[in-house]
Image: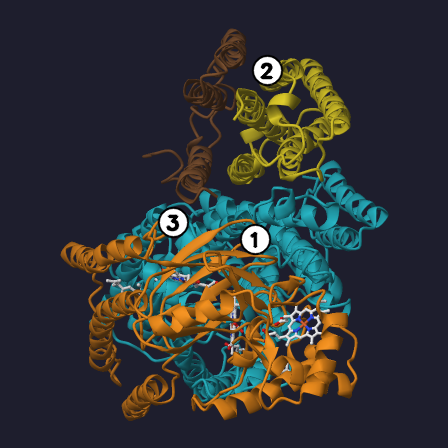
Chain colours: A cyan, B orange, C yellow, D brown
Amino acid sequence: MAQHAARPRNTGLKDWLTTVDHKKIGILYLVAGGFFFLLGGIEAVLMRLQLMYPESNLFVGATFNELLTMHGTTMIFLAAMPIIFALMNAIVPLQIGARDVAFPFVNSLGFWLFFFGGTLLNLSWFLGGAPDAGWTAYPPLSGTTYSSTHGVSFYVLGLQIAGLGTLIGGINFLVTIINMRAPGMTFMRMPLFTWSAFITSALILFAFPAITVGLVLLMFDRIFGANFFEVANGGNVVLWQHLFWIFGHPEVYILILPAFGIISEVVATFSKKRLFGYSAMVFATIVIGFLGFMVWAHHMFTVGMGPVANALFSIATMLIAVPTGIKIFNWLLTMWGGQIRFTTANLFAVGFIPTFVIGGMTGVMLAVAPADFQYHDSYFVVAHFHYVIVGGMAFGLFSGCYYWWPKMFGKMLNETIGKWNFWLFFIGFHLTFFPQHFLGLTGMPRRVYTYMAGQGWEMGNMISTIGALVMTLGTAVFLWNAFVTSRKAEKAPADPWDARTLEWAIPSPAPEYNFAQTPRVRGLDALWVEKMAGNKGMTPAEPLGPIHMPSPSILPFLMSVGFFIAGFGFIYHQTIVSVVGLLVVFYGMFARSLFDDHGFHIEVDEIKETEKGVKL
Amino acid sequence: MGLDCMMRRLQQVGRLLPLFAVLALMLTGCSSDPYLSALTPKGPAAEMQLFMMKLSLYVMLFVFAVVVAIFAYVLVRYRKRKGDNSIPEQVEGNHKLEIIWTVIPFLLLIVIAVPMVSTTFTLAKDYSQDKEAVKVKVTAHQFWWEFDYPEAKIKTAQELYIPVGKKVWLELTSADVIHSFWVPGIAGKIDTNPGMKNTMWLEASEEGVFQGKCAELCGASHALMDFKVKVVSQEEFDAWVAKMSKEKPESTTDGADTALAAEGEKIFQQSCVSCHAIDGNGGKIGPDLSNYSERQTVAGFLRNDPTHTGDEAVRTENLKKNLHKWLSNPEEVKPGNLMKIGQLKPEEVDALTEYLSNLKRQ
Amino acid sequence: MIHDHGVLPAEPEKATLEGRNKVLGFWLFLGGETVLFGSLFATYLALKESFVGGPSPEELFDLKIVALATILLLTSSLTSVFGVMAMHKHNTKLMQLWFGITVILGAGFLGLEVYEFYHYYHEGHTLTSNAFGSAFYTLVGFHGGHVAFGVTWIALLQAQLAKKGLTVVTAPKFYVAALYWHFVDLVWVFIFTVVYLMGKVGA
Amino acid sequence: MGNINLENAHPQPKINKSHGIGVKGHLVAFALSIVLTALAFIGVIYFGDDRSFVIPYIIGLGIVQALAQLFIWMHMSEKGHLFPLVGMVSGVVVILPVILMGLYLCWW
Ligand code: HEA
Ligand code: HEA
Ligand code: CUA
Ligand SMILES: [Cu+2]
């Protein structure tokens, strides 16, 4: 194989810009997503400070609306999804015994598109104002007549670019999971985190095109003078809401399913039991994913769709409680009879259960259409979705970070600091969002920058803001933990938690080639099966040999820069700039297609060197 | 982390729970505004909604109790004990259990769903042909509400007068962006969409001034887009209709500084009438200001009787104060509002305040 | 990688894991495209009666051009099938011929579409004239954009084929491009049904 | 589903020469497409006034034609196409109810 290039040795920045290694891309996602989480969190705290007292004047009117729009958008698209992608990238290929993902190049492209899309969106702060029409950007408020700054254009282009990255990332995971499983790793032996990554990716594949179309329509209205939402010329403002929620509701399951997956892994590991009702769990995941597409209009009960649509969507929505309940009870029964260890990872997983159930409770209450006439667009909804998103997804992601940190970085996070992290975040969380239920029920609409004194909302808001500050402290403790951990010398063992799945069969951090020899999988919880059989590790399915790897490439970065430039061109109506940007993109595609990547090999000596001293 | 440590933590959580309960009580019971809260319904629609809220809450609380009971038991009973390194039985699952926790939630949902469907249809009833019902056309604007009584030919802003115990049939639309009409104490909410017409019925079972809110983000001053629903007795309502619908112009009467008011009227006719109507004469860009002296609020949210004293003198005094504040700098009071006028001179503000605060229909 | 040198297997597009990944990934991508076009169709259906003041679909559409365009695109789909069959027989020359014809037919289709749009534009039916116009040009234009991309793509692949020959690397690209081309054709079936034919049926 | 790529993640490439339908089959498929298209156009030209008949008629023809193309030209029915099938069917299963619910339930 003479064409294969010599092994490239990029270091430092160049390494990170050109890497196609899914583990490094996972770290990139984690760092970038974490950064945006801090940004979104700071925006949230600023909002909470404004709402701490009635009639405050810290962030008034449009400024507050910018904060709230950017908080929602940043958190959902630029923090939550990337951190989910971080864990999926770092772990899914390891869990299925794969050397790599199906499309390493596309994987890297997906990251850079997200990164530049997010950067573009956030640059709006410095270029005349951020978008201010809510993360849902309902027209006509988001149209040029009522939102005349470039803010919403940044939203449209930024999300379009980031969304493209997410979409190709989703396809990459689907193909990886379908085609790259190790011998013996059948679908019904896949760990639940991989299953949830699989279903989540499918949801991405089918949900994102709807928002793509929505954003295209909004962009055409704003930039080319089209009339989709222009009532005077026959447009229809409700159309956007449909397109947005056809995407938006599956999106919330895109957020929660990976967390469900993480909880399933963590709870099983720290109960020292196999997951109770594995096949029911898989089934429930698939059903949730499917039903997720059929309920979008529950965000639109007050739009005026009529009683028939309201009643049917209401019933469809409630149905989702059933498969979700299956999950909750199977987790409880997994712990039943186990030997539960309360590591930080498990604390977050255990804390997840009652908190998420509260969020689900309010979800079912919201699903009751006539009652939603009261809840809708009130703080009750804000409370609901932070319970499921922060109390659900964010707890899950924290749990996942503590659990897989050693596999990603080769070091264990500090458990004592971890416990501070958990308790501060947990208490702060409930303080912040529990009172908001009552604020909503007593008449406080959401998205208000202030409220008059004397309506009975002072105390609830005060407690909520204090809670947000406690949560900030909790998050800061996490950062401190990551920092402290990075400075300590001690290396993590391959299997620090006495865990069950394949990723723990290889050294921490995972070597570049993942598995020196592709393992042969002999059952659910592949590693546990071997441990129980008294084996020291996995049985290889192939002899040791040189491992073929894809070459790093700067093209994904370059193409994303091209999109970034083109985005600016569209926002400012500069056709030439757009054309230049798109030319860069096409150059990248062309170059990628024309010059075949022959990759390189990692030789047996090097593998042996790396694998030395690995013990379970 | 040891057992005692764990127990301590559980106790800490336990200590928090009553705190939450107390908190909940305080928030709902004592301090909330009875004319604003969805929890103190004063009309059949809000009552039905509260019933559905409670029903679903109780069902869900039951579910929550079951989950927490199992949860607590498991956490206490099955935590790992020091030195115990045995390997628990690796249970695969249990079909019977799976069926139980699929079917029972399903049945619980039916309990919610059946009354849900009937309530949904009741709330969607059409009273457009009902001769008894008061018909009102609602138009939302950035950031104020216009109420139009087509039968009585009355136009008002910010305040919806309705008779107690009667059905009111609303047709709602918007002049610009999407807003949402919400009166928590009497009924739920419905969006006002530009280019479309939505409908909804209202009925209040008690007299009083109910608070209304715009519930859909509609721009910079979405937070301040309040309105009032003034529920009065049938006689009072009839009197109001008679007063408002007759052709007779407004007068500035008793106790007013008439010279100042006349000056105000002059300024008004020069600079304001292009947007505001009084007695049906004037522009439609801003709220109709007829009978302004009886307003509960200025600009929809500056309350003239914030503590519900019902005292006319207090209300009038606050009306003047608020009006003065508004006219001195509308942008500061309500950011982004569409009353784009240059800075008025203090004398002009005084004169206009005097004029408007004495506008009264006889 | 086994087949890097030596004989090309019968289905060169599936000979390597990379090739199989590419084909499967592309199928999934088409699944996503289905939702994309579905959303565009939904938009069009929602707005097709909103031609405030402008010409109605019934007045506007000329079925003759559409019929011609349909024939061109259907035929090009057939020629691309022949192209893939030639590929399976490892007949590079024939492959070039069939895919060449595909490109020409596709370009012909595009020409007709441009002509049609030009025509409409002069009848006052534009992207900005009303909501119907916006929906029409966005749906049909998105499809046209797909055709244009496909034509360029296949043309570039032809150049690669001429230079590199048929290998396990180039074969999946052609296979995938042919899939794409069929999909574009398939979408057109629904466009001429939902947009043109239903437009002619009138309100 | 059975043995199609579900149990074995590393299938060996199968070398099967006979490839479903030959040139003739494709020509027939092509003719079928043309006929279906023509039927639709003719339907609209001659029965254009009868909306309740002609709209389901042409949409039905469209669906038949789409299926024919999927299975004949895009080899959907052949071995190893389980996941492509799942992918496309999921896409349709997702978007079709959405469009129908939108059109007839929410009236957009
Ligand atoms: C991670 C994200 C996430 C998740 C998982 C959910 C889960 C659910 N959501 Fe939520 N939701 C959001 C994020 C999420 N939501 C967001 C972001 C919004 C607002 C968007 C915006 O407007 O900005 C929103 C808004 C929202 C609305 C619209 C409210 C409004 O604007 O008026 C509704 C209405 O039906 C709703 C319902 C539900 C339901 C029924 C579930 C269910 O999936 C919950 C299921 C779980 C349980 C029910 C608990 C466990 C089950 C059992 C223990 C079994 C027994 C149960 C029974 C017998 C019922 N959600
Ligand atoms: C993933 C989703 C996600 C997450 C994690 C959060 C997290 C939080 N959110 Fe929210 N939120 C949304 C998604 C999310 N949110 C959405 C979609 C909306 C709707 C928007 C709309 O209406 O359009 C919303 C709206 C929303 C509102 C309602 C605004 C309104 O309607 O007027 C509020 C108000 O309290 C709020 C608060 C918070 C708080 C306090 C947190 C906290 O949990 C945040 C905790 C994190 C931190 C505080 C970061 C830590 C920071 C540091 C450690 C600082 C370090 C220091 C330096 C770097 C110098 N959010
Ligand atoms: Cu009007 Cu909010
Ligand atoms: Cu939802």
Q: Which mark is residue C78?
A: 2
At label 1, which amino acid type do we have?
Answer: Pro
Mark 2 secondary-structure assignment: helix
Q: Quadrant of ligand 4?
A: bottom left
Q: In which quarter of the image is the N terminus of chain A?
A: top right
Marks 1/2 in contact by CB < 8 Å: the verdict is: no
Marks 3/2 in contact by CB < 8 Å: the verdict is: no
* Marked residue chain, label 2: C
At label 2, which amino acid type do we have?
Answer: Leu
Residue at left offset 46%, top offset 49%: A203
- Circle 1 is placed at which residue position? B194
B296 left or right of B43 in image:
right
- Circle 3 is placed at which residue position? A306
- Judging depth in this view, the residue of A339 and A331 nearest the camera is A331
Instruction: Mark 2: give few (<14), some (14-19) or many (20+) Cα within 10 Å.
Output: many
- Judging depth in this view, the residue of A502 and A532 nearest the camera is A502
